[in-house]
Image (cartoon, rainbow, N blue to C red):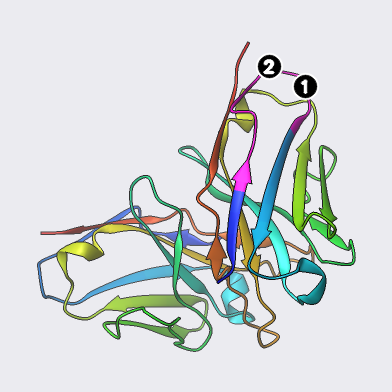
Amino acid sequence: QVQLQESGPGLVKPSVTLSLTCVVSGVPISRTNWWWSWVRQTPEKGLEWIGETFHDGRTNYNPSLKNRITISVDTSKNLFSLKVSDVTAADTAIYYCARLPPLAGTVEAFDLWGQGTTVIVSS
Amino acid sequence: SSELIQDPAVSVALKQTVRITCQGDSLRMYYASWYQQKPGQAPVLVLYGNNNRPSGIPDRFSGSNSGDTSSLTITGAQAEDEADYYCHSRDSSGHFMRVFGGGTKLTVL
């Protein structure tokens, strides 16, 4: 059974770089053809797709966040990570990692989610 | 357009049928998927593609598509269906992007 588990600092100060990890258990990332995504949720904006990575390191990013985010994968540790630079209060959110399996070309769905980790940006 | 529009709130009487809609230009090209989220929990996929339900999702959940609108229908709503529901699709504006609707809070009366 595949499971996702996010971890992060909880509280960060403005202007720093936020780092989050998502540990994948139950399957080697290197043997999958799933996209591994980050999604965040705020009361103001709801769910927002941040970006994703494939096991070979390919990435796709939300254009509105592209300048500040980096997503990477570490197949040796079976995890993928998110870095958000120069954070502000607007980055306060619940951050989820999620799996996107390969479906028919016009179909996509996040079929597995982690439990989420709360990040608060405050001085 | 990268926007998916949902009604903020919908209510339904117990055991009645309710339809939750999601509107957006991208839905003319891509199917929507639907997620249920209860307080304090992560979203759960309940419907995707052309009316496909993941394992474990009751068959009272169904979907349909027409033009720029996708719909999630709950036939015979149960108390445990009270939750927030979000739609999701691929953006069709030319930028590679995955987008979510603003969510619909379903109240079961």
Q: Secondary structure at mark 2?
A: loop
Give the percent coordinates (x, y) of residue B86: 44, 61
Q: Disc 2 designates what residue?
A: A13
Q: Say left or right for B27 vs B7.
A: right
Q: Is residue B54 above or below residue B90?
A: below
Question: Which mark, by number, is residue A16?
Answer: 1
Q: Say left or right for A94 vs B82.
A: right
Q: Quadrant of residue A70?
A: top right
Decide: marks 1, 2 in contact (CB < 8 A)? yes
Specify whether disc 1 shares its chain with disc 2. yes
**Residue type at tag 1:** Val
> Front-most of B73 and A71?
A71
* Magenta segment boundaries in residue numbering: A6-18
Residue at point 44%, 87% (across, down): B51
- Mark pair 1, 2: CA separation: 6 Å
Number of residues whose C-alpha sits closer than 10 Å to that of mark 1, classed few (under 14), some (14–19) or many (20 or more) = few
> Front-most of A11 and B100?
A11
Residue A29 inside the magenta-drawn segment: no
Q: Say left or right for A94 vs B38.
A: right
Q: Quadrant of residue B54?
A: bottom left
Looking at the rendered image, the quarter that the N terminus of chain B falls into is: bottom right
Letter of the chain that mark 2 sits on in the rendering: A
**Residue type at tag 2:** Lys
Residue A17 inside the magenta-drawn segment: yes
Residue at point 35%, 52% (across, down): B8
Residue at point 45%, 53% (across, down): B42
